[in-house]
Image (cartoon, rainbow, N blue to C red):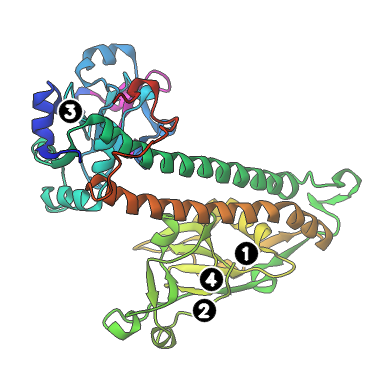
Amino acid sequence: MSEWIVKTIGEICDFGNGKVQTGPFGSQLHQSDYQAEGYPFVMPKDIINGKIDESSVARVSISHVDRLSKHKLLLGDIIYGRRGDIGRQALVIKENVGWLCGSGCLRISLGKFPIDPMFLHLYLKLPEVMSWVENQAVGATMPNLNTKILRSVPIRYPVNVYHQQQIAAILSAYDDLIENNDRRIALLEKMAEEIYREWFVRLRFPGHKQVTFHKGIPEGWEMVEIGKAFEVTGGGTPSKEELKYWTDGNINWYTPSDITASNGVFIFNSVLQCTEEGLNNSSTRLFPAYSIMMTSRATIGAIGINTTIACTNQGFITCIPNQKYPIAFLYYWLKLNKSYFEMLSTGSTFAELSKSTFKKISILTPQNLLIQEFTQKVMPMFSVIENLIKEVENLKQTRDRLLTRLISGKLSVEDLDIHFPPSMTADTTPTK
């Protein structure tokens, strides 16, 4: 059986001439130094789901890259956010090499020590490791991470690097499957949304050339107040002081964070479940599966579809589809009107869209036959999206269970013939 040892990140880096380093001070770059094109400058906000998200990354000119060259990212580096959500970290892959570690970030460069970067990246995602790091963080109002804390993180790993890579390969294969499904989900959502935009926003629906328009509205369409179009309901919170309202609860009770943390159209479970007694002793109300929950306080207009009978707290307006306003049509109408809902929101402490205001909004309502045609076209996409999201949830659960067992050494990989996935590139090709 492979030998496992424990060393701190500092010991690992020192042995291999690596380093744990803070990004450049904020004073070394000013707002005026950022530009639309140039070299990416990675900030904590760009670290998402273990990767560096290029879509919103800031950029600087070559002159700043030369001046800050010691902060260039290398293949296999691990970059951490220094404040706030300090458990957030990403592995530097080939596409990120040469980018700059930004202000507000910390960087681990392993050097030549025999530990696989992917293995370390996955090890640092263990819940107990993340909790350890969070507990060491300093700061009364906002937790802060520093090089001393990162250097002191203990890492347990097999001495044999190939065994480290075997473990990383198994977990990376799950990540590849999840990422592939996420891409398919995003593509299907985009396709369905584009059909909605084309038919009901641009008004280039089937047969539109033969339809007469009156003041920009196709003949046969009408503006209908939401209060007369479909049912709307709100929510409430069973007392948190009554343990019997929450102990062994089996009714999904959604809060806005359930919606904002979700990864797609459909949501299968809430973080908290209340009991029937809790439901009956609060203002929250049950609504059917496949309703559309929309946040209406602070964060306005985040939406998700529940797949079971559920209820929410008071931070929601929940819309219940019907035959005239089916789920896909209503979902995209709500999604594309988010900025309008925000504009209608009021409140001195936090923004809120009231149910009474919402119900007075008018919705442009097409003829029934066109709605039916749209539903027939889009609902098969929604069905595939739901199944893919469910598959992603199952893959994540399996991966997380394996993560703990593999990285702790409880599950041996030594005798397994493991296929290394595409995400483990030629730069990290394993050798026995």
Q: Rounded to the nearest whole Å, what is the CA distance between mark 2 and mark 4?
A: 10 Å
2 or 4: tag closer to the N-terminus: 2
Q: To which quarter of the image does residue 76 belong?
A: top left
Helix, strand or loop under label 2: loop
| Figure disc tally | 4
Residue 25 numbered tag: 3
Which residue lies at the image location 46% right of the left edge and 75% below the top edge?
A: 235
- The mark lying in front, picked from 2 and 4, is 4
Magenta-highlighted residues? 29-46
| Residue at image mark 4 | 308
Q: Rounded to the nearest whole Å, what is the CA distance between mark 1 and mark 3?
A: 49 Å
Helix, strand or loop under label 1: loop
The residue closer to the viewer here, 254 or 175, is: 175
- The mark lying in front, picked from 2 and 3, is 2
Helix, strand or loop under label 3: loop
| Residue at image mark 2 | 286
